[in-house]
Amino acid sequence: MHKIQRFIEISLTSLTLAACVILYTVGLDQAELGYERRWTYPLFFALIPAFCLRAGLRYIFKKKNQRY
């Protein structure tokens, strides 16, 4: 169970970093619409959802570990 949790957290972290880089470059392409698009795209569409998913996964695995 611990190995599955570790694998999911590592893959979530790597996907989040990749999404942040991609969304940052998208924000650079749309810089003429405003400076804040550079950092708001990665923040709202990658970092905050990843934080929520990680908290949910910890909650699920915490419940499963308490049961056994």
Image: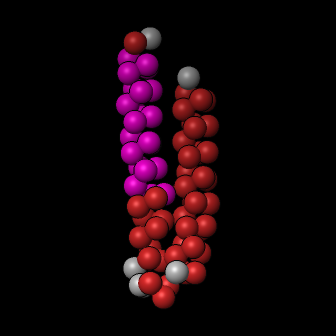
Is the stretch drawn in magenta largely helix, strand or loop? helix
Residue at left 46%, top 50%? 50
Against 18, is 35 above or below?
Answer: below
User: Which quadrant does the C terminus fall into?
Assistant: top left
Does 30 sit left or right of 40 as displayed? right
Judge by depth and name the residue closer to the eye, 23 or 65.
23
Across and down, in percent, residue 5 comes to 54, 32
Across and down, in percent, residue 9 comes to 54, 42
Judge by depth and name the residue closer to the eye, 68 or 8.
8
Q: Where is residue 16, by image quadrant?
A: bottom right
Against 63, is 39 above or below?
Answer: below
Against 62, is 20 above or below?
Answer: below
Does 68 sit left or right of 11 as displayed? left
Q: Is residue 62 magenta?
A: yes
Residue at left 40%, top 55%? 48
Q: Is residue 51 magenta?
A: yes
User: Which quadrant does the N terminus fall into?
Assistant: top right
Look at the image and give the residue range highlighted in magenta. 46-66
Residue at left 40%, top 79%? 36
Describe the colour scheme in one phrase: secondary structure
Q: Where is residue 44, by image quadrant?
A: bottom left
Across and down, in percent, residue 54 comes to 44, 42
Residue at left 41%, top 70%? 40
Does 26 sit left or right of 33 as displayed? right
Q: Residue furthest top?
A: 68
